[in-house]
Image (cartoon, grey):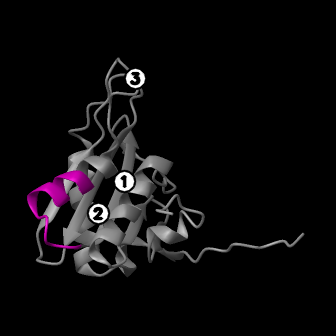
Amino acid sequence: MREKTIEIKVKVFSFSELSEEKQMLIEKAKEVSFGAYAPYSQFSVGAAVLLENGEVVVGSNQENVAYPSGLCAERTAMFAANASYPRVAPKVLAIVAQTGGKFLKNPITPCGACRQVILETEKRFGKEIVILLFGEEKIYEISSVKQLLPLAFDEI
């Protein structure tokens, strides 16, 4: 038997340490989180995708009483970006969460399904997507979803 250790690299920033471009993207994700449809969980998530052409595409979580028919903010934004700009690669994905109008102190990470969709988008364009995970007290920056999904389901 062999044992393997998997490590991930995460950069930790305060909001003011981010570039203006990344601050703007987080602000867009914050704005769209207030349009989330989350009557069951009261947990509103916003996502904003910055594309290589400078366009920003947003998404928020959309719940449904017939669980699991809803959709996460990350997939909503990624699918909208891929549908609207099928030949333009995403550069950065920002994710925020709030409940009761208050943003969480610590960042949240995408669920497994969202991680898989982000991975597929990286594969589609052959480019890594920087992921910003916002929390009021700190922001995580991850260079690629591969850092969050090191043992990904992939084609055989």
Residue sticking out furthest to the front: 156
In the drawing, does residue 48 fall left or right of residue 54?
right
Quarter of the rendering occupied by the N terminus: bottom right
Q: Which residue is mark 2?
A: 26
Q: Position of residue 5 (x, y in %)?
A: 76, 73
C-alpha span from label 1 to label 3: 22 Å
**Which is more N-terminal, label 3 or label 1?**
3
In the rendered view, tell whether residue 150 sits above or below residue 96. Answer: below
Return the mark for residue 67: 3
Q: Quadrant of residue 62?
A: top left
Give the mark nearest the N terminus, 3 or 2.
Answer: 2
Identified by mark 2, the residue type is: Ile
The three-letter amino acid code for the residue at tag 3 is Tyr
Which element is circle 3 on? Answer: loop
Residue 154 painted magenta = no
- Res. 28 mark: none
Image quadrant of residue 27? Answer: bottom left
